[in-house]
Amino acid sequence: MEGETHRVLDASAVLRGGLGFEDEKYLMPSSVFREILDPLYIEKMQSLIRLNRLNVKDASKKSLTRVKEKAREVGDLVNLSDADLDVLGLALETGGVIVSDDYAIQNTAYALGVEVEHAFHEPIKQRRQYTYYCRGCGQRYMPGVTECGICGARVKRKTQKSSVERL
Ligand SMILES: [Zn+2]
């Protein structure tokens, strides 16, 4: 797949996206492939596999660990299914562009520096941002810090309302 951008699909991209599959190459984790139950779509996937345009492949443990760490940092780990994590891991390690309408996937992908395209061609409306601050002394922190380095109290996450931006 060198030299060309391939797209990593989640189930929403296949089932709701109305993808024309006019792009050259696609990747999909096996967990996503198993989520697709409609015989018509299964047939479509299988024909793409035969044409060598779709590859069903799983992310390495290492990539998945990195995805989970980042998802935890941005606060979306609880919102991601195993298949979602597989999609993120696969895109991360192959340099692919994710096609998904899933909000948590989008949010975590941004944090990982992975590009996302929407299955529906609508612009992203909102992007969640959080601030992290110490409950004890109010010191602000970067994501991932759980305990205040100054006073030792817990670091809490707060949605930054003013920063919900329209893109
Ligand atoms: Zn503190």
Image (cartoon, grey):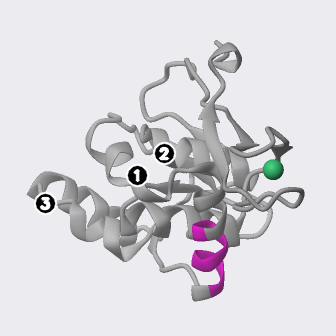
**SS class of the residue under badge 1?**
helix
Q: Is residue 126 above or below residue 101?
A: above
- The quarter in which the C terminus is drawn is top right
Q: Which residues are magenta?
A: 62-68
Check disc 1: other Cα within 10 Å, few if <14, some if 14-19, many if 20+.
Answer: few
Q: Are marks 2 and 1 in contact (CB under 8 Å)?
A: yes
For marks 3 and 2, the one nearer the N-term is 3
What's the mark number on residue 79? 1
- The quarter in which the N terminus is drawn is bottom right
Q: Which residue is mark 3?
A: 37
Residue 142 location, x and y as percent? 81, 49
- Front position among marks 3 and 2: 2
The answer to which image quadrant residue 37 occupies is bottom left
Residue 59 location, x and y as percent? 55, 79
The answer to which image quadrant residue 89 occupies is bottom right
Q: Which residue is mark 2?
A: 104
Residue 46 location, x and y as percent? 28, 68
**SS class of the residue under badge 2?**
helix
Cα separation between marks 3 and 1: 22 Å
Q: Main secondary structure of the magenta part?
A: helix
Q: Residue at x 69, y 72 (%)?
A: 93
Amino acid type at image mark 2? Ala
Q: Residue at x 42, y 57 (%)?
A: 78
Q: Residue at x 42, y 67 (%)?
A: 51
